[in-house]
Image: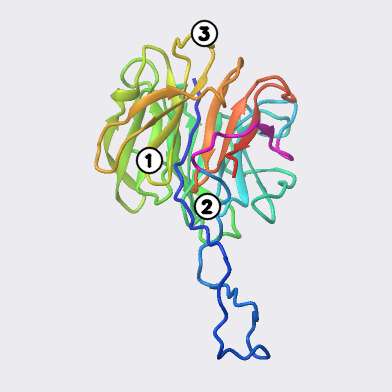
Amino acid sequence: MQRFAVLVPILATVVACGDVPVDPGTDAATDPKPDGHDVDPDAAPPARCDLAKPFGAPTLVAGVNGASDDRFARLSADELTIYFASTRPGGPGGLDLYQATRDTRDGSFGTPSLMPISTAADDWGATATADGLGLYFSRRNAAGTGDILLATRGNLQTEFGGEAVLAQVNTTAEDNEPYLTADDRVLYFTSSRDAGYHLYRAERTGAGGFGNVQRLAEVDSPSSDAWAVPSADDLHLIWGSDRADGGNAGRADIWEASRSPGEARFGNIARNAELSSAGTDEPDWLSADGCVIYFASDRAGTTGGLDIWKAQRGR
């Protein structure tokens, strides 16, 4: 089973400008804003959503979907580059890695291009480091199981390469779909090392290295649990599971859990009804502010197989 992900937001301050009395000593000819409504250039921009509100109706992500499976979407820290996997024609075989860019975070992505690190084996689940110079991803190995690899580049204008297996987290079982927290300090992934698919996390021990691998037993179920997406502060977790919930028996739904600062274990586990459908739903990525989520789904409206969808919280 191959997976998905989420990030919990940090609220931006909304600065409202009310009726401010003008200093009688102010010269209207030199005051840049004679009405007294001066704007602080260092003030944080208004938040793009109200975190207390639910996600709105999902829509297809323009520019990246085709007639084949398109899934495992991850965005760069500035939200201008999307990395995803696809079975579309033109790649070396199976799931291949693609990327596409846009000029603004609310704009449409341009034509996707095949990433040179793609191989004839399945390559999927790419997540970039905050500086954009490292890329963790999954690759099917010769034994038929998945490994987590790290590819790097010297600058943002060059392609990723020199990929190597991440020995600290891989086993002889299936290990795949890595997802980095926004600060690059924790790596979430899926593994079958303990029979069945479960979620794991590893903590950074140095440049490129991770250790202290732990299974998230508190969110486990007898079914498969995968596609981990943590929030920016690592206090909220979104993932996919086909556990029996009275909804989509045998199909993956989107689930959530949370914890308070200082707590080690996640709780408050619940199915996200606003994002889950009668089809398969695999969470992929959550914006750092928690306002936008990307996920893969074969729900009604897809162009073929699994497509990449997004939803945004209301204001």
Q: Earlier in the sequence, mark 3 or mark 1?
A: 1
Name the amino acid, label 3: Ala
Location of mark 1 (residue):
187
Q: Earlier in the sequence, mark 3 or mark 2?
A: 2
Query: In the rendered view, would you say 210 is above or below 130?
Result: above
In this view, the residue in front, 22 or 130, is 22
Asked if residue 74 lies left or right of residue 181, the reply is right
Q: Main secondary structure of the magenta part?
A: loop
| Picture disc at residue 77 | 2
Give the CA distance from mark 1 to mark 2. 16 Å
Asked if residue 226 lies left or right of residue 302, the reply is left
Q: Which residues are magenta?
A: 51-64
Residue at the spot 28% in from the left edge and 43% down from the top edge: 261
Location of mark 3 (residue):
249
- Mark 1 secondary-structure assignment: strand
Give the CA distance from mark 3 to mark 2. 35 Å
**How dense is the environment of label 3, judged by Cα within 10 Å: few (below 14), some, or many (20 and up)?**
few
- Mark 2 secondary-structure assignment: loop
Residue at the spot 44% in from the left edge and 42% down from the top edge: 8
> Which circle, 1 or 2, is nearer the viewer?
2
Residue 183: percent from the left, percent from the top? 39, 51
Magenta stretch contains residue 61: yes
Residue 232: percent from the left, percent from the top? 42, 46
* Residue 174 position by quadrant: top left
> Which circle, 3 or 1, is nearer the viewer?
3
| Picture disc at residue 175 | none
Give the CA distance from mark 3 to mark 1. 29 Å
Residue 231: percent from the left, percent from the top? 43, 41
Report whether residue 151 is seen. Answer: yes
